[in-house]
Amino acid sequence: MKHWKPQELAALQRLRERFLNGTAGAADYWSSESDLALYDATFAERIGWKWDAVLRELTLRGWRPKSRNVVDWGCGSGVAGRRVLAQWPELESLALHDRSPLAMRFATEKARSQFPKVRVTRLEGALPPDSLIVLSHVINELPSASYNQLLRLLRQAQEIVWVEAGTHADSRRLIEVRETLRAEFAPVAPCTHSAACGMLAPENAPHWCHHLAEPPKEAFQDARWAEWGREMSIDLRRLPYSFLVLERAAASGPDGYSRVIGEPRESKGYLRVLSCQESGVADLMLQKRDSASLFRELRKGFEAPIYRWEMKEGKIVRGEEAAPRR
């Protein structure tokens, strides 16, 4: 069994402290290829599990990009671009962008090694024609000027897939992106509608649009992951994330569907379900006696929790599970 070396854990702890104290966006924080390799095997791999959940949900919804070119903006070690190429092998090229030359070199080499048939380049200026742009864990590192520049770049894309940490602040900024681009792009996921985001209603200020991914079983069977979690004070069982998928063409799907936000909260004999639908975000109740099977299903949790609710006296009494095809 191979344990982490003290110098490896010290390097990882330094990186984590930058992320936690909010200084990661101040400057290029990559100082060595060894730091990038450590990050890619740990923090980035954990981010990759979030991407796996998002990509599985898009598959369940029957969605895939029409583009043949993908751009990984703010690529870091390149985990987002690699996950997307693995999911959609019809993609022909990958363009990378990062402020760090060291990160760009690392991400380029990893992508070329894993996908030798894909053309991997550096993003220069405008997006390639018909591009899918992917972004991952960058929103809290963007000052106003960079954020506005990024919005201009996003408007050149055909599709956007953006994954962030599942914090209140990051989720709210993604909602801001959604609303800013909603006149030009149709929301695909997690939304089941194209109306204004219901989270913006004043009564929903304490809430945020977040979800929970399930880490792979191997993470709980690997002593190195267990050690890493202890040393970094990270609970491997919880993997919150927020995400946004937009496309240029008008998305269309069956009407009347809702998506469960976060985890249902259980009390004796009932669940409270934060539900997002075209009419807004609502905190709904499901009593176990009304539908024991749905109660068990929601309590267990699953990816792409999309339902058409049947309501009675303001409570959920039935849920038709569905994946609206876009």
Image: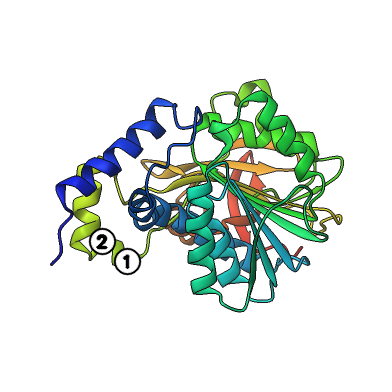
Q: Is residue 257 above or below residue 240?
A: below
Under tag 2, what secondary structure? helix
Which of the labelled discs sits on residue 220, or is there none?
A: 2
- Mark 1 residue type: Lys
Q: Residue furthest bottom?
A: 117
Q: CA distance from mark 2 to mark 1?
A: 6 Å
Residue 102 appears left or right of 323 = left
Under tag 1, what secondary structure? helix
User: Does any portion of residue 196 appear in the rendered image?
Assistant: no
Residue 15 appears left or right of 325 = left
Residue at the image position 25 percent from the left and 57 percent from the top: 225
Badge 2: how crowded within 10 Å, few (<14), some, or many (20+)?
A: few
Of the 4 image quadrants, the one containing the N terminus is bottom left
Residue 194 appears left or right of 1 = right
Of the pair 151 and 126, the residue shown nearer to us: 126
Of the pair 120 and 57, the residue shown nearer to us: 120
- Mark 2 residue type: Phe
Residue at the image position 67 percent from the left and 35 percent from the top: 175
Residue at the image position 29 percent from the left and 61 percent from the top: 219
* Residue 152 location (% of width, % of height): 79, 38
Which of the labelled discs sits on residue 217, or is there none?
A: 1
Image quarter of residue 180: top right
